[in-house]
Image: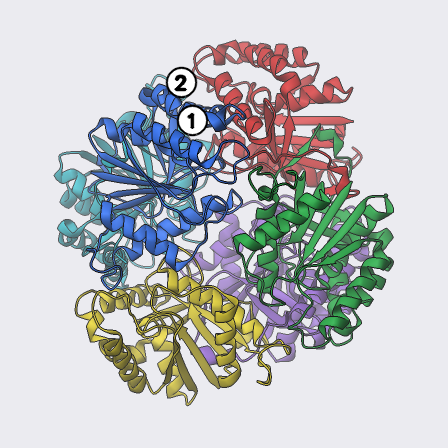
Chain colours: A cyan, B blue, C red, D green, E yellow, F purple
Amino acid sequence: MNLLAVGAHPDDIEFGCAPVLIKEIRKGNQVKLLVLSRGEAGTTGTPDLREREARDAAAKMGASIEFLDFGGDCNLQYTPENRLRIAREIRIFRPSILLATHPGENQHPDHSVVGKLTRDAARLARYGGLLKPLASHKIDNLFYYNVTQHGLTPDVVIDIGDVVDEWEAVMKCHASQVNSRSYIDLQLSATRLLGLSVGVGHALGLYANDPLRLDALSDITLSSRNF
Amino acid sequence: MNLLAVGAHPDDIEFGCAPVLIKEIRKGNQVKLLVLSRGEAGTTGTPDLREREARDAAAKMGASIEFLDFGGDCNLQYTPENRLRIAREIRIFRPSILLATHPGENQHPDHSVVGKLTRDAARLARYGGLLKPLASHKIDNLFYYNVTQHGLTPDVVIDIGDVVDEWEAVMKCHASQVNSRSYIDLQLSATRLLGLSVGVGHALGLYANDPLRLDALSDITLSSRNF
Amino acid sequence: MNLLAVGAHPDDIEFGCAPVLIKEIRKGNQVKLLVLSRGEAGTTGTPDLREREARDAAAKMGASIEFLDFGGDCNLQYTPENRLRIAREIRIFRPSILLATHPGENQHPDHSVVGKLTRDAARLARYGGLLKPLASHKIDNLFYYNVTQHGLTPDVVIDIGDVVDEWEAVMKCHASQVNSRSYIDLQLSATRLLGLSVGVGHALGLYANDPLRLDALSDITLSSRNF
Amino acid sequence: MNLLAVGAHPDDIEFGCAPVLIKEIRKGNQVKLLVLSRGEAGTTGTPDLREREARDAAAKMGASIEFLDFGGDCNLQYTPENRLRIAREIRIFRPSILLATHPGENQHPDHSVVGKLTRDAARLARYGGLLKPLASHKIDNLFYYNVTQHGLTPDVVIDIGDVVDEWEAVMKCHASQVNSRSYIDLQLSATRLLGLSVGVGHALGLYANDPLRLDALSDITLSSRNF
Amino acid sequence: MNLLAVGAHPDDIEFGCAPVLIKEIRKGNQVKLLVLSRGEAGTTGTPDLREREARDAAAKMGASIEFLDFGGDCNLQYTPENRLRIAREIRIFRPSILLATHPGENQHPDHSVVGKLTRDAARLARYGGLLKPLASHKIDNLFYYNVTQHGLTPDVVIDIGDVVDEWEAVMKCHASQVNSRSYIDLQLSATRLLGLSVGVGHALGLYANDPLRLDALSDITLSSRNF
Amino acid sequence: MNLLAVGAHPDDIEFGCAPVLIKEIRKGNQVKLLVLSRGEAGTTGTPDLREREARDAAAKMGASIEFLDFGGDCNLQYTPENRLRIAREIRIFRPSILLATHPGENQHPDHSVVGKLTRDAARLARYGGLLKPLASHKIDNLFYYNVTQHGLTPDVVIDIGDVVDEWEAVMKCHASQVNSRSYIDLQLSATRLLGLSVGVGHALGLYANDPLRLDALSDITLSSRNF
């Protein structure tokens, strides 16, 4: 199975959803990271350095990575052209599962834009009249992850206790960012809180864009009920 | 696996979620129906008749059924005593999955009350200081179903195409209700609309009380994306 | 009375709100369809064919129709220029009632954009400093319709039982679309479900952008209460 | 046509929705006020005085009035018995339109309870198995009014400019309440603000419990669009 | 200034909002804890033990504490009588600030009930016709705290870094509860996550029942903006 | 302390939040108005006249004022370039408190755009890689004001009784607008209604973009509770 994760900045995917990707890679699935800027607006780190850090992080995870130039950090726009560029990547990599930052507002504007572009791109990838001659592709599921917003109840929760150490190592690849601020601590506090809430050590929450389709209710055998 | 479905009236469970229960029974799981009134307020049908219809329907499904007296149709109340009575049933049957009518308001008031009572009962069933000497029980998941409200986007969708004929036969057991009104047509229209929306013939939607816990994202292999 | 319906694609209006338009035409009102693309992105059907299908459908309904080029299917953008182009059409046709696809997100992005553009255009049409020398126009009411989203409780419900056959014939004009997918079945299931919910055969629901102004409460003499 | 308005305290109906009732009375419709306490908890005014004030106000409006004892001001409870008592009144008076205080929380708890009881009573009044031998009754529409909450966008807006003087006189009947606090000023400010928002002098907003059913869209000939 | 905090169980206040109370006590304000059960339903700890633990915790904080018998743990009900009992306590202690568990549903039912009872009691305490001859009292502000729900964005955030050690010691007074489960870890994870989100070590979030009234905008001199 | 208020049109700030700004100026704080168009689309008044009116109003308030050209009234767009232009102004004026029109939709589209642009600009102003060599600036708080929407419960309420006369004089500076429509009456009705709701003569409500951070709960000494 192929999973494609989209992020606005070189560290978004690693901070926001790397643990679930690491779990998939361990299961033998193919994971690709699609990064839409090189962090040009950051207070610390040059674009070249930030790209290198992201490539190191992807390599450590066992994921492939690709950078697209959408005009640079803080310049991402919700336009038909940008939607189509992501749709093109979806047609090429043909993921079953797609992940992007949450489209909700009141966060870094690039995060919201990436969520909206990716959501729409997943539809456009299905329409036969577009992007010829690339064959249409229909993803199965689209999930959203958070980078710095942690105030919404997730739809899906995944125990990440077995990959939390590897996750921390992956986050540390972004040395230009984590040395000056408490990003790693923030993410681990969020997964610790959610983990305790559901009865495990650390858990990551995601948001489903569509209803989850099950073959039968009893296919869900785990529980998130702890308090 | 045990599944317990709770309804206010003799036909709520059959109209609202029987197809997913039938699927579970076909898989070999144990399903019990807990009915909290005998339809005393209905315009048609006597309480005795309605109980018989429900027992026939349960038998046809292959489910066990039990009636509890909570004061009769239109008399269900959200009280600690009533919560405890359902918690007692949970401790006795020990279900992994619990289903109840949606607790949202602006519907038959009994439906909302059953949703709230069952939601709370699932917590109380865990607390050691209550209902001694019955052993505590922690359910894994609580889902809500609709009877006549069809205006909310569900969290979970299940293809019921293979059981829709059996479902219709089960609904017809409630002859005192279905002869005078379009209940069966209403339910089949709702599952037809949702089915077409997700790309199958008929589908039933449910609402999750808690985040769904997965071992890995790729455990979800079906898709509800069709339009 | 003039009614103007705006759609992104050649079949949006027919699938989403044609029954209420047919009722108005039968009452002697003037209905115009404004279509903002020629379905260039569709998997089936050429733009020329799709325009012809839409013109046939409009003729069958008794509505006038006009196509505007906004850059093509999947290219509609929420920009001041596009708002003004719709405002210009409002000033020319001077409708009392305006209809557009719902502006909510998580649907075909063109549908959301058409809802937002039309909503804003209805304001701009009032401002004297714009679009001179076309005289300002103030619409009375703006309603939204759905094309493939059917999960919101409508604000307004209209019995369409007397026009459902004509509606089906109108939808069938879009042969390039309806032969390959279950669009007609989807719409009829939605209006059937809503119809049963309110006690008629088929009903269409709409969303009001503004509070409905009545002269007196008793002007509302019909009821949507059935379950 | 009959309209039944339900209030918790002797002045709720007068302050919250009297202008729309006065308009109905002027049109020749029958209006009845159902009051569920005698204001026993008020800081000023005795129960006897408050009942007299309400009877005076009803007489001035041309409405009939009835007091029911539900245990007194601040003692209203959301119970099956209380629902049935209101359902009984519905069956006796047989209104087409029913009005009650909004069921939302975070206001005087009696107001929320009256909204919930009345909403449910309107359903129960339909069920043949209840309240025999009183014949079942199905209302057409249920609207909610505000007493002191003014922060929700209404669903329906009605110009009350022609009855605002009579309304003020009706409110002044509750001398024990209005002399000590700014109730009248509060209501007139709310209707003035809403009136200006929709382009008239004073307007009252109401909330619809169910979608409004129209025969055709063009039946709505007024507009609430002003800014 | 007097602050009154209301909790359903002997440890609710300590786990949910003790840090802000400790800060007030250090400033010289009077804090009283009102506890509405003795934890009778708990899996561990007897009622006597749990009351002793709570008294120890209150003493360590420097707060007074009072237990009221509302029928015991898991038996709290939203009734007029119970509202009045809390209103009576409000009239006696005359707090400016009142705190209670959040009234939202889908948590321990007692928590929701305490939130609703306290919210309503704060209104009833103002009405002159009730609870004579105790003088009416109007609180200034009502805030809600969480015990185990941590998924809502708070309205108010308070840095608790300087009292976190004392808070931990206070929580440890509830030895019968904290030895068997991860309650303390859960609370500290939540305040750590919120603290990092706003740029401090630990912060507690609260929910305001009413708009906050300021004399001037510039009275707010701190910031919660960090990411 | 510096406060920066951003508006789309020459009179937005004066109508929407001038009273709180006047209070700050009286306290000795510096207030700057940033206006993003010259009202080119208005039915009455030329751009030159409207700019003069705004400069007169600012002078009367004691605020500085600056006009930026974003393409003119009804042409404001949510683009990265426009965000950066506001971020630049933030870095130059370095406000602690920032105010903008509410970003919610279904109002004049420029109002929503100004809210979104300003919200994002406040983030971008912090990022070191942007707008060099202007030094980064972090605002403390962002509040939104309304111009013509008055249907949301505010987060913050401020008594403006002592400045309401001055506010009215400031609004009257916009003679080209206020002579033809009831803008002043609309604003005064809204502040009168909110004022009565909280127990004062006139009050203005604002919306907080982020949780309010307090040093201690008891720092809030005023109350908005009146009904």
* Residue F129 placement (x, y as % from top left): 37, 56
Q: Chain of mark 1?
A: B
* Residue B92 placement (x, y as % from top left): 23, 48
Task: Please tell me which residue lies in front, D27 or D206.
Answer: D27
- Nearer the observer: mark 1 or 2; the answer is 1
Q: Quadrant of residue C99?
A: top right
Task: Please tell me which residue lies in front, B141 or F93.
Answer: B141
Q: Is residue E153 above or below residue C169?
A: below
F160 displayed left or right of C145: right
Disc 1 to disc 2, C-alpha distance:
29 Å
User: What residue is shown with label 2?
Assistant: A128
Query: The residue tagged with tag 2: helix, strand or loop?
Result: loop
E127 displayed left or right of F130: right
* Residue A93 placement (x, y as % from top left): 26, 28
Q: Is residue B17 visible?
A: yes
Q: Chain of mark 2?
A: A
* Residue E199 placement (x, y as % from top left): 35, 68
Q: Quadrant of residue E12?
A: bottom left
Task: Please tell me which residue lies in front, E74 or B214.
Answer: E74
Q: Is residue F138 visible?
A: no
Residue found 15% across the figure and 53% down from its top: A169
Query: The residue tagged with tag 1: helix, strand or loop?
Result: helix
D147 displayed left or right of F77: right
User: What residue is shown with label 1?
Assistant: B191
Residue found 35% across the figure and 16% down from its top: A133
Q: Is residue E144 above or below residue C130?
A: below
Q: Amino acid at mark 1?
A: Thr
